[in-house]
Image (cartoon, grey):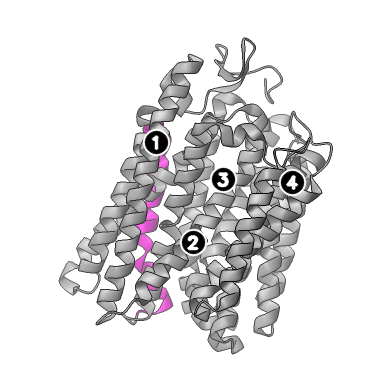
């Protein structure tokens, strides 16, 4: 296969990993009711089906990013895709709830192996002048995958092909995974410029255990009634993660490079990803649950009920790159505020038949904001990352994404379950939380805009180039500060030069 064709296949191959990861997060939102009925799962087991995937996914990301440095990003991507695909087959064939839970745990681990490698391959193998478009495609894929789960899952459950029901939805990722594995030899074999001599074992154990003890009670505590063990787990998580932060300052090969947290652009970027994702997954999850529960919609109707959101997201992701170039983080702030406004419109219009057209329109507008944010946020954050911190950010960004999603589902669920006169009031409580989360995300975007502008001025890179992801590499005269690109937008050693 020619080098040109290999370059053309690079993004489709690695972004297939992004698609299956996030599709598997959201597909269970509409499938869990059928899973409970088919497998006889209880409430706790059903919660583990949802939470198990996120648990192993989020916990493994930081360590997986460093493993990519050590053993090669292509090798770890292929390993993750193989594990994920095999686990998908096992989960779809599960005869009982605990086999399904085990499959979901392994699925999440496979996703955790893949996710950091995708960003690292984009940073290492895509020429700088093409990275903004590649990162925009990455964000658009996240948007499409997050919404394809409820839509396609609802359709497949309703159509029930070959009597498979929810199992058909689980199997949808298998041909995508097999195709990616078949084409994976065309991926470049890339390593970080700062190849890790080893993976810090103490840091790995502290981060894995700390995140696990944090995420598991957040994901399951509400449904369990917050028993004492959840609070003990959260307290231990704080201690272990604090120990992890201290340990990273004392080892030769830290999992998280010190410049990562020292850079205000990165700190604000991680904050906005965390807070924004504390609103997005819970928004679609609660909407799906409310439509199937209080409104009595079928899985197919529910899937179609969020279709305007998906269409808006595709439209928003299509122009996100140009909006990011022109407005920078202010586009992220506007997107978050748009979703906050839509969150307040949905409870007013969802139950009124005469207002359903307003509901569809508002949902489309919210999807547009979601698409703009998701397709441009990572581009703008990574643009301000120092080269030596690229691997750390590749692991921390999806970690913040998953942690924010878990936290948001917990908090929105608490708001929805708060005492209310009727289901409509419960939805108001939840959407009030969503509006507050998106407003806070807009505040974080303002902070990101301020520090991005200061960083661009300090490095003499035009703000438009910085926001577009073209500030990369170290300037020889000022180590750690991005240098401007040459006339062709490339740096020596870039693939495809």
Toward the viewer: 227 or 366?
Answer: 227
Which of the two marks, 1 or 3, is nearer to us in this view? 1
Total marks in image: 4
Decide which of tag 2 and tag 4 comes sooner along the chain: 4
Indicate the secondary structure of the residue bearing disc 4.
helix
Real-space Cα distance between discs 3 and 2? 15 Å
View extreme (right): residue: 197
Look at mark 2 in the image and give the residue it sits on.
407
Q: Which residue is mark 3?
A: 397
* Residue tagged 4: 184
Q: Are marks 3 and 2 in contact (CB under 8 Å)?
A: no
Position above or below: 473 against 133: above
Residue 279: name its quadrant: bottom left
Q: Residue at x 35, y 30 (%)?
A: 327
> Picture coordinates of residue 484 (x, y %)?
54, 15
Depth check, front residue: 495 or 49: 49
- Please name the residue that numbered disc 1 is placed on: 447
Q: Quadrant of the C terminus?
A: top right
Which callout, 3 or 2, points to the residue nearer the camera? 2
Q: Is residue 100 visible?
A: yes
Q: Residues within 10 Å of mark 4 (few under 14, many from 20)?
A: many
Give the residues drawn in magenta, as a range.
297-324
């Amino acid at each position: 296969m020619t080098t040109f064709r290999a370059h053309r296949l690079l993004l489709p191959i690695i972004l297939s990993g992004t698609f299956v990861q996030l599709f598997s997060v959201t597909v269970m939102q509409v499938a869990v009711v059928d899973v409970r009925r088919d497998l006889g799962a209880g409430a706790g087991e059903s919660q583990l089906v949802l939470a198990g995937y996120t648990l192993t996914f989020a916990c493994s990301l930081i360590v997986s990013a460093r493993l990519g440095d050590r053993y090669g990003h292509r090798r770890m991507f292929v390993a993750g895709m193989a594990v994920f695909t095999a686990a998908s087959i096992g989960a779809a064939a599960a005869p009982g709830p605990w086999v399904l839970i085990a499959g979901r745990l392994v699925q999440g681990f496979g996703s955790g192996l893949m996710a950091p490698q995708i960003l690292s391959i984009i940073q290492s193998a895509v020429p700088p002048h093409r990275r903004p478009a590649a990162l925009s495609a990455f964000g658009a894929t996240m948007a499409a995958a997050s919404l394809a789960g409820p839509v396609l899952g609802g359709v497949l459950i309703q159509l029930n092909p070959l009597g498979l029901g929810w199992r058909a939805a689980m199997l949808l990722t298998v041909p995508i995974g097999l195709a990616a594995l078949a084409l994976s030899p065309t991926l470049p074999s890339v390593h970080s410029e700062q190849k890790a001599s080893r993976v810090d074992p103490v840091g790995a154990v502290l981060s894995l255990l700390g995140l696990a003890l944090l995420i598991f009670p957040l994901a399951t505590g509400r449904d369990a009634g917050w028993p004492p063990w959840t609070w003990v787990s959260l307290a231990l998580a704080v201690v272990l993660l604090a120990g992890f932060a201290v340990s990273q300052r004392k080892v030769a090969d830290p999992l998280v490079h010190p410049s990562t947290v020292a850079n205000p652009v990165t700190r604000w970027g991680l904050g906005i990803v965390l807070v924004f994702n504390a609103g997005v997954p819970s928004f679609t999850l609660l909407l799906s649950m409310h439509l199937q529960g209080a409104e009595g919609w079928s899985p197919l109707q529910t899937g179609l009920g969020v279709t305007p959101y998906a269409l808006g997201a595709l439209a928003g992701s299509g122009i996100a790159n140009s909006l990011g170039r022109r407005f920078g983080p202010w586009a992220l702030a506007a997107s978050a505020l748009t979703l906050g406004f839509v969150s307040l419109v949905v409870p007013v219009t969802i139950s009124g038949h005469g207002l359903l057209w307003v509901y569809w329109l508002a949902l489309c507008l919210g999807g547009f904001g979601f698409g703009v944010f998701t397709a441009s946020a990572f581009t703008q954050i990574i643009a301000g990352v120092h080269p030596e911190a690229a691997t750390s950010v590749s692991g921390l960004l999806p970690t913040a994404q998953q942690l924010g999603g878990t936290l948001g589902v917990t908090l929105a669920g608490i708001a929805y379950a708060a005492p209310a006169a009727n289901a409509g009031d419960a939805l108001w409580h939840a959407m009030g939380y969503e509006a507050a989360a998106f407003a806070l995300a807009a505040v974080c975007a303002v902070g990101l805009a301020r520090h991005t502008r200061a960083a661009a001025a300090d490095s003499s890179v035009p703000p438009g180039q910085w926001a577009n992801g073209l500030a990369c590499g170290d300037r020889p005269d000022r180590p750690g500060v991005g240098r401007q690109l040459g006339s062709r937008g490339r740096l020596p050693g870039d693939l495809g030069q």
